Image: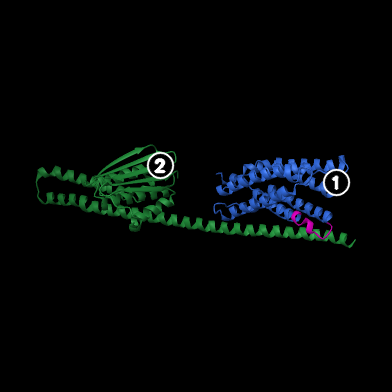
Chain colours: A blue, B green
Amino acid sequence: MDSYTIILFLLIFLGGLIGFYKSKSITPPVLKLFPYFLMMQFSYQLIASLYSFVFTNFKSNYPIFNIFYLINFVFFSFLFSQIISAKWKRIFIAITAIIWVVFYFINLFHIQGISLLMTYSRTMLGILVVTYSLLYFHEILTDDKNQKNPLRDATFWVVTALFFFYLCSTLTISLWNYLVINKAYFGNVLMKIYAFILYSMYIAGFLLHKNYLRLEKPL
Amino acid sequence: MESADFEPWIAILFASLMLLVIGFFMLAMLIVYQKKKTKHYKEQQQLKTEYEQSVLKAKVEIREETLKYVGLELHDNVGQLLSLIKLYLSRPGTEQKTDVKQLINQAIMDIRKLSQDLNINRVEQYSLSDFIEQELNKVHKAGIVKTWFDNEGFCEPSNAQNRLMISRIFQECINNILKHAEAKNIFVKLVAENSGCMLHIADDGAGFQIDAAHMGSGLINIYDRVKLIGGDIQIASTIDNGTTIKLRIPHI
């Protein structure tokens, strides 16, 4: 494990702690689950890294990531279905989430299997999260009733972070074979940069969040 | 070796580019938010101005109605009494003294009543049910139309301006009935409900065809005022079967 990976773990852990600290004032309620999600991210990524780099001699940790793709996607689809209010968008999320889960199991048992990194499922996950994020942005741009400052809303930060992380990382994975420079090094550095930005934006969202519901109550 | 030196710069460049894109994206969202906020603020201001103008207009209309009523009463009632007193006094006779005294007392009572009606701020001083009762008494007193009032529960807008608007809506409805309906009875019911109050006004008059295209300014004013207080109005009418108006007054 290099120092960048350790800093990244600390960042995820810090995000989780700040999330727990601010969870009372965080709205909508689904975002209260986010610190638990971050702690889960911290735990499984730490276990995966320790397994490969400390306990074994660079043995593949892909099975751990493959299992957590499913958990991550279920959480993301639930998160988006809760923060998006338009009925047709929620139905779209539910249908595509079911299709993804079915495809995940087909990929797991019949195509790539658990020992390889399930890139097909990962790419589909990335495309879906980017689509869900666009649905969210469409909603906040077209909803006249929404008077929240996006920069003081944790949901906006979380969705923006997810949008850019999955957009860039999915493009990087898709274009992996076309990279002319040192793939392993460059890809690794890029993924770390994306992850740094992702977790930093989560933390920024929690810290900048303003509880509009509390402010609307009469004094 | 060259490639190893080059790669960190590409990574830094890529990261900076990504941060720049995210920055622009957030800035764009912030600009959209500011525009929406400004638009919302302007709409709120416009609504506030419209509401204030409507309150002012309602106040002026109520004053005009009051002055018209007082003028008519002075002419038809007090004027007649004073003429009668003058007639009695022009024929001297001791037996008429008590009649004259009674007439003068009646005139004093009527003038006292009129001076109460002349109190321009009575809408703000009286409760909504009291105002309705007073207005119906005036109509009833004229003797052409019978009025019925049923008041269930406590129904009182806390905001004096909204009370003024509701009073004016009620007055406008009654005026419409007197002008156009040729009704014999007016039934009014004020009921307190969980979500606010319900004011029912019904008559057994000629009724009319509800047609938005031929809606008079009186009805348009009623709809506008109801909208401004956040209420809801339903008008049901058929020819020869009278008209029913249901005004839902929110908790205000």
Residue B66: % across, % down: 30, 52
Instruction: Assign the C terminus of chain A to one quadrant of the image.
Output: top right
The reply to whether residue A211 is visible in this rendering is no
The reply, left or right, for residue A89 in relation to residue A48 is: left
Q: CA distance from mark 1 to mark 2?
A: 70 Å
Residue B220: % across, % down: 37, 55
Closer-to-camera residue (A67/A13):
A67
Residue type at mark 1? Met
Q: Secondary structure at mark 1?
A: loop
State the residue at coordinates (44%, 54%): B51
Closer-to-camera residue (B56/A190):
A190
Residue A17: % across, % down: 73, 42
For marks 1 and 2, give the one nearer the viewer: 1
| Residue A174 magenta-highlighted | yes
Q: Chain of mark 2?
A: B
Farthest-out residue, top: B153
Farthest-out residue, right: B1
State the residue at coordinates (34%, 53%): B62
Q: Chain of mark 1?
A: A
| Residue B114 magenta-highlighted | no
State the residue at coordinates (15%, 45%): B100
Q: Which mark is residue B197?
A: 2
Which region of the structure is painted magenta?
A: A173-182
